[in-house]
Image (cartoon, rainbow, N blue to C red):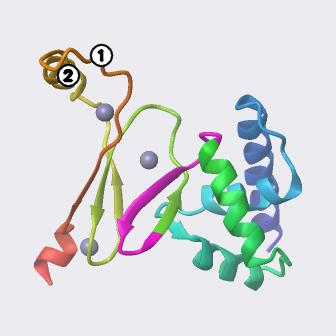
Amino acid sequence: MLAGMAQGKQVERQARETLRALGARPTAQRVTVLAELMGESNDLTAQELHQRLRRRGSRLGLATVYRTLGLLSGEGAIDALSHRPGEISYRWCGDHHHHHLVCSSCQNVVELGDCELTPWLDRVAADHGFVATAHRLDVAGLCADCRAA
Ligand SMILES: [Zn+2]
Ligand SMILES: [Zn+2]
Ligand SMILES: [Zn+2]
């Protein structure tokens, strides 16, 4: 119990520092939402996150959670994923450029390491007189567990 609380405080401190480093105001709402995502290795929808926070005794409303997630995503603190039909989910990731493998069955998310797409994208972009400055890519599929099931 005490250990859990101490850990919670530490995650909140990390959330505050992450927000400051991004130049975002570390409001209580942003810190609460970001800290919750930092403690979760998979992605969560606004509704799932809202339910968790409620179970912890938080009074943040669903609309506030939606808005806060949108802000955090816009500020680059979290990633927005669109692999769930009709729903955006959010995940806390490192700040390096990366891509995800997402399981369409159990929603498991795997973060990929080094991206090797840039040389290919530079080439195909140049074929169209284009200069590529950024790209986003998530790969949908079935994870090993779901393939075995
Ligand atoms: Zn990510
Ligand atoms: Zn799966
Ligand atoms: Zn990439």
Question: Which residue in the protein does label 1 denote?
Answer: 131
Regarding ligand 2, which quadrant of the image does it lie in? bottom left
User: Image height check: is 122 above or below 78?
Assistant: above
| Whether label 2 touches label 1, CB < 8 Å | yes
Give, as a single range, the part of the protein colored magenta. 75-87
Q: Residue at x 55, y 52 (%)?
A: 92
- Tell me where residue 90 appears, x and y as whole percent: 53, 60
Q: Residues within 10 Å of mark 2 (few under 14, many from 20)?
A: some
Asked whether mark 2 lies closer than 8 Å to ligand 3, one says no
Marks 2 and 1, how far apart in space? Answer: 6 Å
Quadrant in the picture for the C terminus: bottom left
Q: Residues within 10 Å of mark 1 (few under 14, many from 20)?
A: few
Q: Residue at x 69, y 50 (%)?
A: 71
Q: Is residue 140 left or right of residue 25?
A: left
- Tell me where residue 148 appears, x and y as whole percent: 12, 78
Question: Which residue in the protein does label 2 denote?
Answer: 125
- Tell me where residue 82 appears, x and y as whole percent: 40, 61
Type of the residue with mark 1: Val
- Tell me where residue 114 appears, x and y as whole percent: 30, 31
- Who comes first in sequence, dot 2 or dot 1? 2
The answer to if 53 sits in the magenta stretch is no
Q: Is residue 131 left or right of residue 58?
A: left
